[in-house]
Image (cartoon, rainbow, N blue to C red):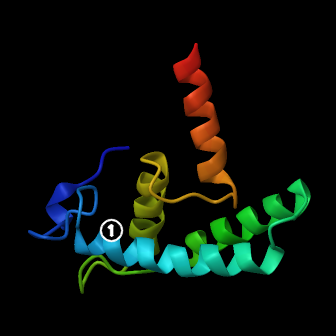
Amino acid sequence: MEFNHNLLRRGDNYCGIGGSYERLLREEWEIQFNRLVDEIGDAAAEDTMRSAAQKVYAWVEDSCYPIRPRVLHPSMTRGSFHILADTLRVGWHPEFMRRLKHLLETREEL
């Protein structure tokens, strides 16, 4: 699937650093993600972490943050969150960043 860059205005390019739409999505994600991580605690079992990840993902699927005033379809928000996840800016699992770092370090050692 290719992203339609015509939907963006100057300064809204959320795939780039500092884009206002990316900032909005990441701030909203961070609130939800941190709330669930705090709720399950540091010693959560894998099943509990997976359940939390599913809640974060469900929240993403239900979210609708307009990229522009007349672009209100929730698929834009869902797709944008998936682009951010694909580029490792957000994640669903509470330990996604720690696990990713471990995988990358292991790869560098090879």
| Image quarter of the N terminus | top left
- Res 103 quadrant in image: top right
The residue at which mark 1 appears reads as 22
Q: Is residue 21 left or right of residue 74?
A: left
- Res 105 quadrant in image: top right
**Category of crowding for the residue at label 1, using alpha-carbon neighbours closer than 10 angstroms: few (below 14), some (14–19), many (at least 20):** many
| Image quarter of the C terminus | top right
Amino acid bearing label 1 = Glu
Q: Is residue 108 left or right of residue 53?
A: left
Residue placed most toward the observer, 102 or 70: 102
Q: Is residue 49 left or right of residue 62?
A: right
Looking at the rendered structure, the secondary structure element under dot 1 is helix
* Residue sitting at x 69%, y 55%: 95
* Residue sitting at x 80%, y 67%: 42
- Res 27 quadrant in image: bottom left
- In the rendered image, residue 67, in percent from the top left (x then y), is placed at 29, 76
Q: Is residue 46 left or right of residue 38?
A: right
* Residue sitting at x 48%, y 80%: 28
Residue placed most toward the observer, 17 or 62: 17
- In the rendered image, residue 15, in percent from the top left (x then y), is placed at 28, 56
Q: Residue furthest bottom?
A: 69
Q: Residue furthest left?
A: 10
- In the rendered image, residue 58, in percent from the top left (x then y), is placed at 67, 70
- In the rendered image, residue 91, in percent from the top left (x then y), is placed at 57, 57
Residue 18 seen in this snapshot: yes
Image height check: is 35 above or below 50? Answer: below
* Residue sitting at x 40%, y 81%: 65
